[in-house]
Amino acid sequence: MSYTIKKLPKSEVQIEITVPQEDIEKYYKKACEELSKEVNVKGFRPGHIPQDVLEANLDKKYIMAHAQEMAIQRSYADAVIAEKVQVVSRPKIEIKSETPFSYIAIVAVLPEVEIKDHKSIKVKREEVKVTEKDIEEVMEDLKKYTTTYKDSEEKGKKGDRMEVDFEGFDEEGKLIENTKSTDHPVILGENSLIPGFEDELIGLKKGEKKEFDLTFPKDYPKKDFQGKKVHFKIEVKRMESAIEPEINEEFIEKITGKKMPSEEFKKEIEKNVKDRKENEAKQKVENEYLEELLKRTKVEIPASLIEEEVEFMIHDIADDMGSKGIEFDKYLEKTKIKIEDLKEKYAPEAEKRVKMRLALQQLIKEEEATPTEDEIKAEFEKVKSFYPEKEVAKITEDFEKGELKAQITNRLAIRKLFDKVLG
């Protein structure tokens, strides 16, 4: 076997390989042996069909194609290993000649990543503070989620729940399409309807009617309604007063599952709010660092890597739709979206993701942030602790297969990297 390697733009290499005729003859013989196991010839057992009999029952071109495929797999692997080519995608094969058998393999390789002075990247971390207002907002939310309602003849106020019929008319008194609803539920003060609508409902009782004009916002999602003046006619069909719970030890036990005084409960809320804010601040710092890192990263990304990332993104979207009972192919058909247009749409984001991944891999190497086997095993033990006993065997099997281990390794490496570069 002989070969030549040539560098191409966009982090690709071209490997031209010639396989000697004597090797092709060996692969042809081996191809006959393999194909004899798949062919039924009367009077012969599968796997024991003589070559001349097999050739009489199969097209020689088919056998040769199988032999050439075996030759490509072996010779390509030998060349890549010998030259230590760091391939990152499947090769594109083009047969150059049949005799002698030669072909060209074009394959993407791990690109060189150049990061300009990443150590000078500075990101300001915001100081996390928990105010009394933050705690009160959480307590108000808890009260809102546990609020009950009862039918009422009283006037509606913020927090109460109504069911209303309404219709919208234009300046000529004609009913406007998509402005009519019956028994429409609304909680006063939640601003789920257009601005000003719920304000008009406050003070009304069950059975009362009212007419009023409202102008839709200029940034309203539906263009036909942007800035449009509409005359509404409404009727309150049902009125329910809100019964907010009192925050006492009984309420706290119902929410948390344990008894504690209200002051201790407030401290628990404060801790949770602080943890959330710290996580948000940490995420913000990391995101800002990554955006700056991208600006300083120079890399020629192979087109095949971007294509693979686009395929992954579309597959992820299809899976998400499938989990919601939407068939992806039918969605494309209904919306008249072409898969090619979808690929073009997601290509820039895919390129950004690949560039980020390559930059992080380079930094992990430079900063020596690769986790040790002990750290990986310790992290896996933490992961296992979140699973029920009956699922531990399955999760352990996934870890040993390698995919889960790779995910944990990557997560740990990024965590170690951020600890080093961001403190």
Image (cartoon, rainbow, N blue to C red):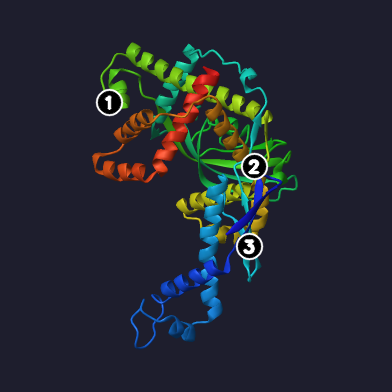
Callout 2 secondary element? helix
- Amino acid at dot 3: Tyr
> Where residue 206 sits: x, y (%)?
48, 37
Q: Which residue is mark 3?
A: 103
| Residue at (46% x, 32% y) in the render | 411
Q: Position of residue 343 (x, y in %)?
A: 64, 52
Does label 1 or label 3 sit earlier along the sequence? Answer: 3
Disc sitting over residue 353 in the figure: none
Q: Residues at badges 2 and 3 in contact (C-beta under 8 Å)?
A: no
Q: Kindly identify which numbered label has been placed on residue 351.
A: 2
Q: Is residue 111 above or below residue 101?
A: above
Left or right: 305 with respect to 160?
A: right
Disc 3 crowd rating (10 Å Cα; few below 14, some 14-19, many 20+) is: many
Residue 306 higher or lower than 38, as above or below? above
The crowd level at tag 2 (other Cα within 10 Å; few <14, some 14-19, many 20+) is: some
Q: Earlier in the sequence, mark 1 or mark 2?
A: 1
Dot 3: element: strand
Horizontal side, residue 326 vs residue 104: left or right: left
Given contact means CB atoms under 8 Å apart, are the residues at marks 1 and 3 in contact?
no
Looking at numbered disc 2 in the image, what kind of residue is underneath it? Glu
Instruction: Give SS at disc 1.
Output: loop
In this rendered view, identify the residue nearer to me: 225 or 399: 399
